[in-house]
Image (cartoon, grey):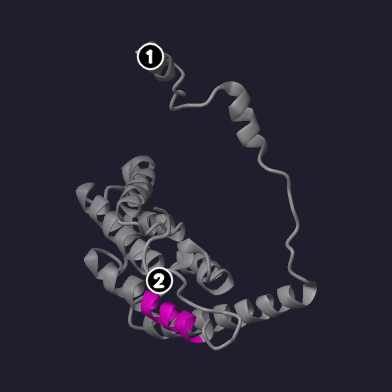
Amino acid sequence: EGQVEEEEEEEPLPVVGWREFLEKVKGPEYTESGKPVSERLWDAVLSFGAAFVGLFVVCYLHQKADALEDNLFIGSFGASAVLIYAVPEAPLSQPWNFFVGHLLSAVVGVTIRNIFNNNQDYFYIIAPLSCAVAIFFQHMLLCIHPPGGSTAIVASTRPITTRWYGYYFLVTPVALALTILLCVALLLNNIPRRRRYPHIIKGGVR
């Protein structure tokens, strides 16, 4: 019994001490990539081509749709392009994370906007709250995708235009653009022999 009590007393605290904190902030030693220049160049060319094609299609349709007072593009899609086209093997780049992470964040953003009745006087609450809530639900649904935080903020704070208000935002630009970007990723990431997408069907951070 005495040994059990000693073991319980030695159980570490859920937070670190200041020395361990400083070590964590310092981070590990930097190491260079082991890939030769030729491989890095090939990866860069593949990523460039895929990102250009995916965003070109979305931006072209966005420009055409703009004449109809509609939109198909938001800045967070550019951040997603880096993930799904440059590091398609990364857990946070997988289709579940990409598609559901964005869509879920858009739902959160629009909902919070409606809760505050689109009163942007509370921008300092609406923006961080929408991002934080989106992160919470991304954790719960195993669909963490960093650009989704930006989507949540855009959905909750962007100035109202004809169709950029309400849950129609989930259809376009979000769902429609995501479908295009994902289809391009599935196509162009699987043509080269050295690439494969997806790597993980569901769940980035478990």
Amino acid at circle 1: Glu
As drawn, which residue projects farthest toward the bottom? 191
Amino acid at circle 2: Pro
Instruction: Tell me which segment is drawn in magenta.
Output: 177-187
* x then y, percent, for residue 195: 57, 79
Label 1 element class:
helix
Who is closer to the viewer here, 12 or 87?
A: 12
Viewer can see residue 114: yes
- Residue 57's label in the rendered image is none
* x then y, percent, for residue 107: 27, 60
Which of the two marks, 1 or 2, is nearer to us in this view? 1
Any magenta on residue 181?
Answer: yes
Q: Is residue 22 left or right of residue 83?
A: right
Q: Overall secondary structure of the magenta stretch?
A: helix
Q: CA distance from mark 1 to mark 2?
A: 48 Å
Who is closer to the viewer here, 135 or 42?
A: 42
As drawn, which residue projects farthest toward the top? 2
Sequence-first tag of 1 and 2: 1
Q: Which residue is mark 2?
A: 95
* x then y, percent, for residue 14: 43, 27
**In percent of the image, x 38 and y 11: which residue is there?**
2
Q: Which residue is mark 1?
A: 5
Any magenta on residue 26?
Answer: no
